Image: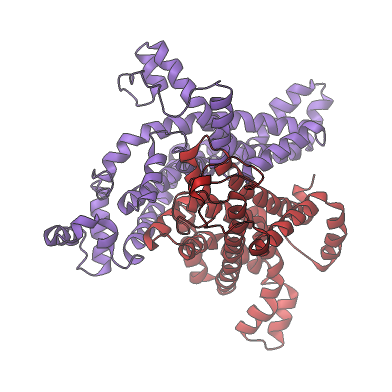
Chain colours: A red, B purple
Amino acid sequence: MSSATQDLKLTSQSRLKLLKTLRKSPAVIIGLVIVLIWIVLAFSAPWIAPFDPLEQHIPDRLQAPNQTYLLGTDELGRDIFSRVLYGGRITIPAGLAVIIIDGILGLVIGAVAGYLGGIWDEIMMRLTELFMAFPTIILAMAVTAALGPSLMNAVLALVIVRWPDYARLTRGIIIENKTAEYVEAAKALGGKNPYVLFRTLLPNSLAPVLVYGSLDIGNAILIFAGLSFLGLGPEPASPEWGRMISIGIDFFDQWWMWLFPGLAIASLVMAFNFIGDGLRDLLDPRMRT
Amino acid sequence: MPIYQYIFRRILFAIPLLLGITVVAFLIANAVPADPINANLPQNALNNEKLVTAFREKWGLDKPPHIQYLTYLRNLLRGDMGVSIKTKNPVLEDIRQFLPATFELATYSILIGLAMGISFGVISAVWRNSWADYLVRVFALIGVSFPVFLLALVALSIFHAKLGWTAGPGRLSFLVKDPPHVTGLFTIDSLLAGQWKTFRDALSHLILPSFVLGSFVSGIIARITRSSLLEVLSSDFIRTARAKGQIEPKVILRHGLSNALIPVVTILGVLYGNLLAGAVLTESIFAWPGIGRYAFRASTSQDFPAIMGISMLIALIYVIANFIVDILYFLIDPRIRYS
């Protein structure tokens, strides 16, 4: 994954082209619209949800979708529609948090390793290889199990699992740009190492990391949903999508219990992938077809 | 470079990686939780002073961290991964019992994934920008965007519950007995024993979960095949082949595809790891008695030693799969041999 993403570059020229092409790329626009809708729905859930997501209506349990309960009810008579709306308030911030923290962590670690080179670079590269020797969700599963299941720990586990990609990406860019003329110029003007690294080199590496983050957020959401499907996410009653599906397995015939939260995850991840794929096509000419 | 030399070098590379995996696992198991005793012993054993002392001594918990790690490594080399809190069996014994089912599922899945992914990729590249191409790309997008456990539930409800085309959850029907144990793979064992009925039943149970896991990886395979074949088809030697008057299918399959598949081979190891992770998320939906279902039960019941055992095992398989892929790569791509 890192080799493909290393090719991502965003010059000022292509930035202009990006804006132009964005208008011509329906996939990116569809993706953006779906993501925006989800953000609005999640944000306004307290006002538009017909019921409290935790409120139980035992007499109405396991009802198929109907006029009162638009998407049916679960085994405790909770309204699935309200729960799906509230679920966005957990998943979207969790996914964003992982990308932002990993982006910052990866930028700093990767930049320092790439800039200093030598033993520091060697240590970081070997360390990232160790993390990458585990399939992501398996490592995340082990970390969350050790920390104890909770929303915060699931996010923390994802941060621990995903940082190597960001660090390696940043390192590659820094090494490539280290010998560029503008860096030489900054050094010739008497810039000290931290200044050259954080004020000149790093700002120029930001764009590819942002693009990678937009590609990766769908992944992060899928792994997060997987963790909570395994019971390693937020507490059991919480209206988290993966958790709702996990409970739904025991109620296989009540398809609305697992289908709607599942479609919520799928639509959100697909929308992010639309955006990410579109951006990659724009920025990596080899992938353009 | 002769192949044995290459294999020897890859083994040398794999050793530090394997050691590293044990370090990461050790750090997770011992440095992260506040108290490894709480995490590893069942509730009722915590009050038992003798059990707690025995546990502390066995894993060297009263010694400094580096000694603890060496103790951990020694126990691991003896095949001791601790005792599962839920099943009360040694974790290694549990894994030995559940692994064949997962191995059988994963093998069928990767074969299905390759068959689907490569043919879709070829169709997509050859008829580029046609409706077939768009269909394949949408399929690939669904493959990478849908949570695999949702695919599993949808497939089960349509093809088993609604249409009745395939058998339901489990490895065999209720009244069918396990074939005599040889490999642990029911489709092979039943054939060896000449039990046609068992074979058909096993296959009917296998088909749905392996299609789900297969399509889970086929999206990635289709994408890579497509872009790689597009690149190869625009190269000079393809033009030469066409100029020589070779028929188009032969140009595409013989000259194009055989070269385009190299990137697919390189990611096979990663895909196998994905597949095992996918198995963890889907086996419980199909009531498939493999390590995935074992891991699901372990995580939902906070069975820490079992989770660590599974993670180590999957990381190990992941390293071995990548090792095999490296050797395959050496065999099919002559450029490595001369570099």
Q: Position of residue A180 (x, y in %)?
A: 72, 72
Residue A143 appears left or right of B97: right
Which residue is more in the foreground, B39 or A216?
B39
Please, which residue is most extreme toward the front here? A59
- Determine the residue positioned at 30% across, 19% down: B180
Q: Residue at x 56, y 38 (%)?
A: A255
Where residue B149 appears, as percent x and y from the top left, is: 53, 41
State the residue lying farthest toward the left: B50
Q: Which image quadrant is residue B142 in?
A: top right
Residue B10: tell me if it is visible.
yes
Q: On screen, A205 above or below A21?
A: below
Image coordinates of residue A21 in percent, x first then y, are 86, 56
Residue B47, horizontal then vertical, whole percent: 17, 61
Which image quarter: residue A105? bottom right
Residue at position x 58%, y 54% in the image: A83
Q: Nearer the viewer, residue B230 or B303?
A: B303
Q: Is residue B333 visible?
A: no
Q: Is residue B276 left or right of residue B134?
A: left
Q: Residue furthest bottom?
A: A190
Q: How many marks?
A: 0
Position of B58 with respect to A253 (left or right) is left
